[in-house]
Amino acid sequence: MTPVNFYIYISLALFPITDIFVISMDISENHENLKHELKEKLKCVSSRQDLEKIKLEYIGKKGILNQLFSKMTDLAANERKDFGARLNVLKNEIETIINDFSNNFSQPNTSEYDELYNSLPGKKPEIGHTHIITQAIREIVDIFKPLGFTRVRYPEVDWEYFAFEALNMPEDHPARDDWETFFVDLPFDKKMGRVVLTPHTSNGQVREMLKGKLPIRMLNISRCGRRQIDISHGPTFFQFEGLVVDKNINTTHLKGVLNYFAKNFFGPDRKIRLRPYDFRFTEPSFEVDIDCGMCHGKGCKLCKGGWHELGGAGMVHPNVLKAGGIDPEKYSGFAFGWGVERTYMMKSGTKIDDIRHIFANDLRFLEQF
């Protein structure tokens, strides 16, 4: 077939090397020149933006190749097939050159750059950490472990019997009121009563005793629920329950364990005190206070008296021992139960003024710990 004597004139904007570049419609005469000029332009590319401009120049909607394809309508019907086949070959070669350059564009091409590139520190991925509550639980477990305490787990949703009845709390006790405890809408059992969200981890006391393995050094940590909320209380919270049952256990053992924990958890300069109180499942019973981490018992705006209430403790009531199948004439014990979040608020250096921050899932707060 005779060469087609048809030319396209491309302006200086596309080819700055020459004033006017003429592409013959006989593709075989000019496609090598077109590829050569493309390669020369790619040598000057210094950014992805430059590379995108060249792509548009050659294979974009208004690029050189599409302009050539658009001129096929000006050819005779018997000339279009041969012209289109040659133009497709050129298009594939142009796209291959650009794609190969694009794939290797980010690779260093000099030994000096290679040394610099490999020596640059990488961007470290963001790594999270355990929640403040998990941190506190792990620290509490580690402190009690040397004393022989073993962590156990008991139901967070339990029968009313284990949460109240077995703990010497009669049916008319205020804690068993609907306004104090979360009751689950499940069938009532004549022996076990209703189902509740455990208001304390003390539901594990009798369950542990019923195992029949003495002596007992139990540490039960679990989620609890109570119908109350303010800056120092939440409707859901974690509590750790300590229980010791053995022969000849008395209040000096209780105070010794609490002092040991306070020194190791809150700080060596912190002190606790025991105040007489009334709990149905312990006798005698105590409220446990820790001195303020700011004023150390002198009194300030944060504590209003120098002390913070931690939780309850006392000697296990004989009726609770009996419910657990233990003879109170031979064995005695003590128990204590404190909120994990409340305890952590009293820790030196934390300065948490509202317990609700701990459950807010605000990264600005949680990342501080």
Image (tube, rainbow, N blue to C red):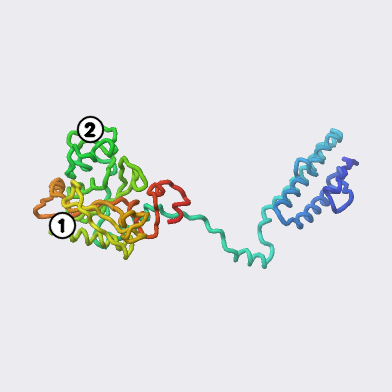
Q: Quadrant of residue 78?
A: top right
The amino acid on which the numbered mark 1 sits, given as a three-letter code, is Asp
Residue 150 in the image: state x and y as whole percent.
25, 56
- In the image as oriented, which residue stretches furthest toward the right? 5
Q: Quadrant of residue 302?
A: bottom left
Residue drawn at point x = 44 percent, y = 47 percent: 361
Residue 186 in the image: state x and y as whole percent.
27, 33
Quadrant into which the N terminus falls: top right
The residue tagged with tag 2: helix, strand or loop?
Answer: strand
Give the camera-side residue of 120 and 42. Answer: 120
Up-down relation of residue 24 to residue 352 (above or below): above
Give the camera-side residue of 369 and 92. Answer: 369
Residue drawn at point x = 66 percent, y = 57 percent: 106
The amino acid on which the numbered mark 2 sits, given as a three-letter code, is Phe
Q: Which residue is mark 1?
A: 246
Q: Quadrant of residue 59?
A: top right
Work out whether residue 49 can be spotted: yes
Q: Which mark is residue 338?
A: none
Judged left or right of residue 117, residue 287 is: left
Quadrant into which the C terminus falls: bottom left
Judged left or right of residue 300, residue 208 is: left
Give the camera-side residue of 118 and 358. Answer: 358
Up-down relation of residue 79 to residue 302 (above or below): above
Q: Which residue is mark 2?
A: 188
Work out whether residue 93 can be spotted: no
Give the camera-side residue of 368 and 94. Answer: 368
Q: Please tell me how crowded label 2 is: few (under 14), some (14-19), or many (20+) other residues with Cα within 10 Å.
A: few
Sequence-earlier tag: 2 or 1: 2
The residue tagged with tag 1: helix, strand or loop?
Answer: strand
Q: Please tell me how crowded label 1 is: few (under 14), some (14-19), or many (20+) other residues with Cα within 10 Å.
A: some
Residue 197 in the image: state x and y as whole percent.
29, 40
Residue 291 in the image: state x and y as whole percent.
30, 59
